[in-house]
């Protein structure tokens, strides 16, 4: 987590978009990195930012079966009905992967 904190402290934009995951919150959610998700949200990451392979952070966490991250994102205001990405929505992502 130190590299994430270091990058943020040096001015890295937590909502920068590019690449397969499109943004850091989606990448951390897909990887199951709950503490990094918390840091990014505390630093102002847009919970509903869209783009990339999984559409948004909630879909990425749902695809990976990361129940605690899904709960955290929902508690913080993630749009449960947001559309987009590989699976279309979070329910389809969780269902397709058997979660």
Image (cartoon, rainbow, N blue to C red):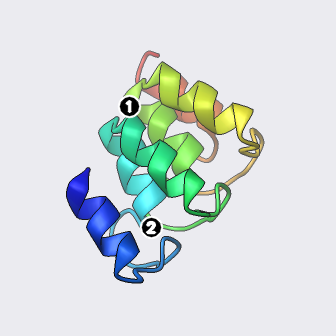
Q: Are marks 1 and 2 in contact (CB under 8 Å)?
A: no
Q: Which mark is residue 99?
A: none
Q: Is residue 82 visible?
A: yes
Give the residue displayed 33% in from the left and 62% down from the top: 5
Q: Quadrant of residue 22?
A: bottom left
Give the residue displayed 30% in from the left and 73% down from the top: 7
- Count of residue discs: 2
Question: Residue under circle 1?
Answer: 64
Question: Residue under circle 2?
Answer: 23
Q: Does 69 appear above or below 2?
A: above
Give the residue displayed 50% in from the left and 43% down from the top: 38
Q: Quadrant of residue 12?
A: bottom left
Give the residue displayed 61% in from the left and 25% down from the top: 71
Mark 1 or 2, nearer chain start: 2
Task: Residue 8 in the image: state x and y as whole percent.
Answer: 39, 71
Q: Does 45 appear above or below 78?
A: below
18 with respect to 93 (left or right): left
Q: Secondary structure at mark 1?
A: helix
Q: Residues within 10 Å of mark 2 (few under 14, many from 20)?
A: many
Task: Residue 92 in the image: state x and y as whole percent.
Answer: 59, 32
Q: Does 10 appear above or below 39?
A: below
Task: Residue 10 in the image: state x and y as whole percent.
Answer: 34, 81
In the displayed image of the protein, which residue is found farthest to the top? Answer: 98
Q: Secondary structure at mark 2?
A: loop
Towards the viewer: 27 or 41? 41
Towards the viewer: 63 or 5? 5
């Amino acid at each position: 987590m130190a590299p994430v904190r270091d990058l943020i402290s040096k001015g890295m934009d937590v909502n920068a978009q590019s690449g397969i995951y499109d943004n850091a919150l989606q990448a951390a959610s897909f990887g199951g990195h709950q503490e990094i998700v918390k840091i990014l949200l505390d630093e102002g990451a847009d919970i509903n930012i869209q783009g990339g392979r999984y559409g948004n952070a909630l879909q990425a966490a749902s695809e990976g079966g990361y129940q605690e991250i899904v709960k955290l994102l929902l508690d913080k205001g993630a749009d449960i009905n947001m559309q987009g990405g590989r699976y279309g929505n979070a329910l389809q992502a969780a269902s397709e992967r058997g979660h």
